[in-house]
Amino acid sequence: MKAATEQELPAGEQEAALVGELDTSVSSTLMRGIEILQCFSMEEQELTNSEIARRMGLKRPTISRLCKTLLHLGYLRKTQTGAFRLAPRLLSLNYPLLATMPWRHNVGGPMREMAEMCSGNASVGVMSGDSFVHVQTAGLPPGWPHVPDIGQSGPLHHSALGWSILSMLPSMEYDAKIAEIRAIHGRDFEESSSLMEAAVARCQTEGFCVSYGDWRPELVAAGAPIGRTEDGLFVAIACAVPRYRAVAEYFETDFGPRLAEAAASMRLSGVFRLPPRLD
């Protein structure tokens, strides 16, 4: 973990390294099995044993044994070429979690309104470790470079949605979360921390923030904190448009404040509570 303060750890090793440092009793076998699932992405939907072994830095027989177990459980499937793909059974793990968030359907209307207002898309996300995860989306503009979907994740320290979530954390939780992000992302966090801090402060004073390609260079996004649910989830909303047609003045003086108002209207349901500001 010492190296993590100097450079960002490879994807899939980040949270695992932090967990391993905090608790030596964790199961490395279970951790590796989950890391295999995390190797797949929209860009790399098929992977062979050799490719997975190379990404994880493990021997092929070890990866083969783990993949056979995941195949037996139904979480991986084999292609005609012998490569692996994620299996639909993984979706069944999402339902019990999503079922605990009935409020997702209540925010659908305001999300669609905001997506139509900016002619873009809208997403609501919650905090998960050093990332956010989309739990509801709206808007499907044709020809877009990126369309968010449920389950997609992104960095807390590099995005309007992440900054909006961080802005709601009470002081001690905020400090602990920043320490966690710093330990995982190292130099990358240090280089972006001043921008993140300014955006967090803006969310606390103005109710929104704007990101100009900080996570995805091709997008401009506005984010706003919604609040904390009774079971402890920090929830925020973000709307994005392609950068080539984004007008900064519109986001800063018109759409941003409107998004903050939409988030405030969502809190009227009583499901979300905006925690006290940071010290």
Image (cartoon, rainbow, N blue to C red):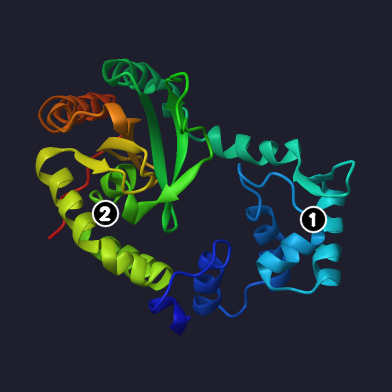
- Secondary structure, mark 2, is loop
Characterize the local packing of mark 1: few (<14), some (14-19) or many (20 or more) Cα atoms within 10 angstroms. Answer: some
User: Label 1 sits on what residue type?
Assistant: Thr
Residue at 32% over, 56% down: 157
Res 169 label: 2
User: Label 2 sits on what residue type?
Assistant: Leu
Q: Which residue is mark 1?
A: 48
Give coordinates of residue 125: x percent, y percent. Answer: 40, 39
Front one among 100 and 252: 252
Q: Is 69 on the left-hand or right-hand side of 127?
A: right
- Secondary structure, mark 1, is loop
Q: How many marks?
A: 2
Residue at 27% over, 16% down: 117
Q: Is residue 30 above or below residue 263?
A: below
Front one among 157 and 27: 157
Q: Is residue 128 above or below residue 174?
A: above
